[in-house]
Image (cartoon, rainbow, N blue to C red):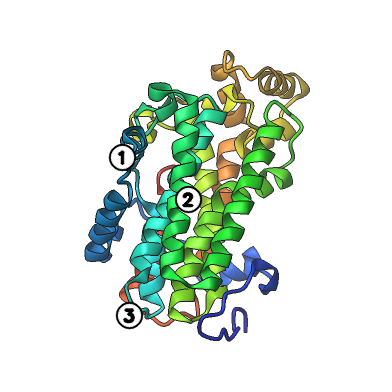
């Protein structure tokens, strides 16, 4: 039986120990695809008390004697966002029957690590807009943003020490290391128009899906239940979310996404819609894509958008995101039914509802 792995209480393991993923055909044969256009509200409501406690904890842990640290930290955290990763921690823990309170700290830890990566990303990408307002680096400068990102990383690990769960510390140490590798890999690939889909998937797993994977795993790890299922769920949830995010760069609304449309092109990022269009377009059109990536220019964004649309780049990418959603949901097949499992399944649908 797939995912039938018995995990002793207090033990966490690495992805190298996982069983192989099911094929897409086996996924679709067992579980019909359904897509809901959802908001985050139902997911927050399912863990309303816990979510409120996590937000309170986040604010308290941002306190610092250094005013600039506190100001930038609060600016980023108060920008809102979906708090998707902390919600995954809470739902994973509760769906697996956890009865303690350490999942609240772990949700805050995950959010701090995520926020730190955003601060660093915006500096590396020279971004000026996130979630509909100025980035911290645009407002305070690069150096303060990087250093406050470091503060959030270190505060997250202070909280991990308070939890005093060595296997979970191992999971988080591994995750942050992999995320850093992904960011470096993405930076090294910027401006390279020959990136393959395989390399693209490596990068988005490391820089995005890995933290979703860790968020899902630590909930099960606290509960002492099947981490395998939660690791697979978190991985594919994160992959779906990032692919959908990359599609939004070519068909999103700035009022909804909160970022400049076409920013990936301007940063020289070969995302999945571009990769598919490049590989299926006529040489003239493929050359236009290659030149834009090589020059890190969005000057021909309109023409490239038409190429991406006409050669199936957006539809193919959404198809791949849908595949990731189904794999995420299939991972929970053997989990006992509960309100929290249902919400986890809906959360997978939500990850791509923004581009449906």
Under circle 1, the secondary element is helix
Residue 341 position, x and y percent, is: 38, 72
- Which residue carries the number 2 mark? 154
* 263, above or below 113, in the image: above
**What residue appears at the point 31 percent right and 41 percent down from the top-left corner?**
65
- Which residue carries the number 3 mark? 99
Specify which label sits upstream in the sequence, 1 or 3: 1
Label 3: few (<14), some or many (≥20) within 10 Å?
Answer: few
Under circle 3, the secondary element is loop
Specify which label sits upstream in the sequence, 2 or 1: 1
- Which residue carries the number 1 mark? 74
Mark 1 against mark 3, which lies toward the viewer?
1
Under circle 2, the secondary element is helix
**What residue appears at the point 41 percent right and 48 percent down from the top-left corner?**
353
Residue 2 position, x and y percent, is: 62, 79
**What residue appears at the point 44 percent right and 54 percent down from the top-left corner?**
156
């Amino acid at each position: 039986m797939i995912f039938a792995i018995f995990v002793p209480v207090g033990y966490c393991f690495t992805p190298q120990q996982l069983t192989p993923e099911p094929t897409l055909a086996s996924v679709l044969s067992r579980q019909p695809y359904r897509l809901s256009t959802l908001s985050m509200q139902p997911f927050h409501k399912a863990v309303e008390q816990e979510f409120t406690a996590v937000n309170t904890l986040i604010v308290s842990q941002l306190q610092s004697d250094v005013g600039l640290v506190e100001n930038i930290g609060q600016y980023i955290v108060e920008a809102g966002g979906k708090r998707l990763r902390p919600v995954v921690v809470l739902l994973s823990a509760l769906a697996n029957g956890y009865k303690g309170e350490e999942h609240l700290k772990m949700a805050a830890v995950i959010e701090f690590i995520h926020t730190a990566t955003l601060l660093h990303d915006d500096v590396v990408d020279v971004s000026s807009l996130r979630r509909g307002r100025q980035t911290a680096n645009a407002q305070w400068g690069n150096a303060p943003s990087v250093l406050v990102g470091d503060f959030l990383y270190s505060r997250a690990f202070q909280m991990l020490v308070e939890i005093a769960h060595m296997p979970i510390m191992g999971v988080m140490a591994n995750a942050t290391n992999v995320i850093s590798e992904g960011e470096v890999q993405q930076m090294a690939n910027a401006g390279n128009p020959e990136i393959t889909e395989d390399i693209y998937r490596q990068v988005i797993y490391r820089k995005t899906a890995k933290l979703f994977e860790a968020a899902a795993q630590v909930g099960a790890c606290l509960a002492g239940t099947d981490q395998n299922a939660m690791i697979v769920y978190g991985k594919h949830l994160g992959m779906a979310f990032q692919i959908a995010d990359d599609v939004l760069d070519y068909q999103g609304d700035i009022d909804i996404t909160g970022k400049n449309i076409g920013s990936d092109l301007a940063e020289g990022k070969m995302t999945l819609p571009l990769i598919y269009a490049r590989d299926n377009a006529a040489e003239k059109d493929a050359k236009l894509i290659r030149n834009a990536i090589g020059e890190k220019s969005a000057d021909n964004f309109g023409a490239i958008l038409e190429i991406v649309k006409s050669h199936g780049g957006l539809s193919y990418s959404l198809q791949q995101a849908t595949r990731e959603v189904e794999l995420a949901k299939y991972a929970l097949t053997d989990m006992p039914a509960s309100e929290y499992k249902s919400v986890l399944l809906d959360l997978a649908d939500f990850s791509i509802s923004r581009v449906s």
